[in-house]
Amino acid sequence: MNGPDLTGRVALVTGASSGFGERFARVLAAHGAKVVLAARRVERLEALADELGRENALPVEMDASDAEALVAAVEAGSQAFGTIDILVNNAGIPDAQRAHKMSLELTDRVLDVNLRAPWVLSCEVARRLMAAEKPGRIVNISSVAHYRYDGGGAALYAVTKTALARMTEALSVEWAYANINVNAICPGMFVTEMTDGMFERIGDPRPGLARQRVPEVEQMDSTLLYLVDPASECVTGAVIRVDDGQAAKGKLR
């Protein structure tokens, strides 16, 4: 398979039960990494681990709003495969409500999953990398919502994704001395389980998109692999938009 050889690397992917997370886990495993699969829907993780091979994949039930579960997932992966040196902070939830109509419970959950969890996991992984004196790669999955928000609900989602992009920049500086690269990908609208429900609500979005298409998750592979590959050694603190021109078109209106 073309691309980097990740043999000997250990990756933790959150939100690995579907969508981008499942795809990222498959891609990293296909290139030789051992992968810790973390999400709430453990039955899906078990099935994916069976498919990838239990010698290559470890399913870990993890609620991203539970700080103790986050640390436990890192510990489980480290015990199984060794020090985690690739972290993909992919888990996230939309709010899909007007800001003033959101309950405090939903507000807290969106903040916990979309922002606190990546912070806690990044710090836990970084501490262990520093103790082991190993370099590492952290990839945060932000969103095109960092660049534009057109109203209609999901304002808090947009806020958390901008905060995640800023967190990426700040931690890249914080940990530069330890050779821990921290970067972010901002996907636009892709075909995933999350967008299936959105399409049901808003209808077919393709006529309003720059290329009149909705990309497939496989089209994110090369960006992820670049950011975990030695080829991107000098790339840290980058926030990369992968949206097929969707946000750029919005700015031209």
Image: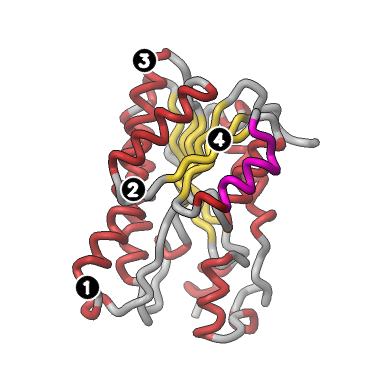
Considering every residue shown, the one lying at the far right of the view is 1
Which dot, 4 or 2, sits closer to the camera? 4
Q: Position of residue 85 (x, y in %)?
A: 50, 26
Q: Which residue is mark 2?
A: 166
Q: Which residue is mark 1?
A: 103
Q: Which residue is mark 3?
A: 131
Q: Secondary structure at mark 3?
A: helix
Identified at 60% across, 43% down, the residue is: 25
Q: Which amino acid is tagged 4?
A: Leu
Q: Which residues are magenta?
A: 44-54
Which dot, 2 or 3, sits closer to the camera? 3
Q: Are marks 1 and 4 in contact (CB under 8 Å)?
A: no
Q: What whole-number distance in Å separates the C-alpha atoms at marks 2 and 3?
A: 25 Å
Q: Which amino acid is tagged 2?
A: Arg
Q: Which residue is mark 4?
A: 58
Q: Are marks 4 and 2 in contact (CB under 8 Å)?
A: no
The label on residue 197 is none
